[in-house]
Image: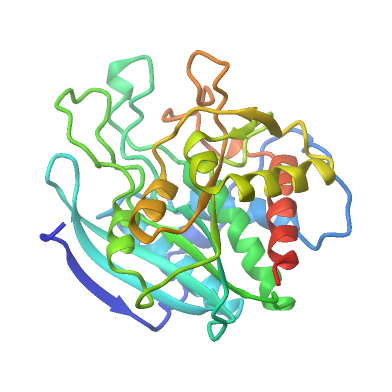
Amino acid sequence: MNKWIYMLATTALLSCGNSGGSQTPAEPQVQPAAVVSSSTPFNADSAYQYVAQQVAFGPRVPNTEAHKACARFLASELERHGAQVFVQEAVVKAYDDTPLEIQNIIGSFNPEQKERLMLFAHWDSRPYADAEPNPKDQRSPIDGADDGASGVGVLLEIARQLGQKAPNIGVDILFFDAEDYGRPDFVKNYKPDTWCLGTQFWAKNPHVADYTARFGILLDMVGAKDAVFYKEYTSMRYAARYVDMVWEKARNLGYGKYFINGEGGAVTDDHQYVISGRNIPCLDIINYDPETEKGFAEHWHTHNDNIKIINRETLHAVGHTVLDIVYEQK
């Protein structure tokens, strides 16, 4: 930790100049699933386009040009929707001591409000496809359409809505970096805390001194068809009342097939470092099924995690639920 270099910029980055990031890839040649109708302003098409725009940059791995270009895009979108934008730039050490140039990108709505809610996701993508069955396919980066881009896409659409209708309390949207640079399966030497490096840095160096929030919601892998969200163990241990509130909201909105009223396993994810580092109760909405052998979806950490597996209905179920929770806070 003491080797980390820290710089905080309180101004937003300029809009993306990478032409590849401004072009949306062709959508899958399948009929999208029907979006559940409701009065919520959440727009699944918009969230989908935000996912596609991230994927169009290429793998968003620290120290790459695609990573830098996507960072500019994310910051400019938050600023465009009216957020006060903070960009934390830091150098952290990967599992193999590789220096990683990272950026945590934060957008604050109603920054003057003391009572706050934090919504967060990681925006980087995995540098390895280490869950591929063929070893020769394991050492190249993945698109990370679901694992990373889906949560960010939902939160960018929520940011767009907050820019049109302000919430009653302060809301911080945080895009954490280097979550997915943890030790790959083909490296056997164990080293603790190699995941969620951006979140670990932020927990020690929050964008606002003494930052706290009422609670936090993490979105991770929330875009695939047939996704299921069980009540993750760490979330229940530290934020059970908020887990129950979110799952009840989802069921009342008709999304019970996604939000399963059952206990899930413990997942190493950004929320645990927010909990331990800032003492903020947090919950993780993550596609993880403890009743299956693998737990994670089949595309997890493979090259199949691409735009073809992103489903509007799933994005809508998560986005609608979270946005309703945000607007209900007093």
- Can residue 26 be seen by looking at this rendering? no
Q: Residue at x 44, y 34 (%)?
A: 267
Q: Nearer the viewer, residue 154 or 200?
A: 200
Q: Residue at x 69, y 31 (%)?
A: 260
Res 49 quadrant in image = bottom right
Rendered view: 28 above or below 155: above
In this image, 76 relative to 260: left or right?
A: left
Residue ranking furthest to the bottom:
112
Rendered view: 286 above or below 12: above
* Residue 30 drawn at (x, y percent): 74, 33
Badge count:
0
Res 248 quadrant in image = top right
In this image, 317 relative to 192: left or right?
A: right
Rendered view: 262 above or below 244: above
* Residue 6 drawn at (x, y percent): 21, 70
* Residue 44 drawn at (x, y percent): 73, 52
Colour convention: rainbow
Q: Nearer the viewer, residue 10 or 32?
A: 10
Q: Residue at x 46, y 59 (%)?
A: 280
In this image, 123 relative to 330: left or right?
A: left
* Residue 325 drawn at (x, y percent): 71, 59
Viewport quadrant of the N terminus: bottom left
Viewport quadrant of the C terminus: bottom right
- Can residue 95 be seen by looking at this rendering? yes
Q: Residue at x 57, y 75 (%)?
A: 115
Q: Nearer the viewer, residue 73 or 41?
A: 41
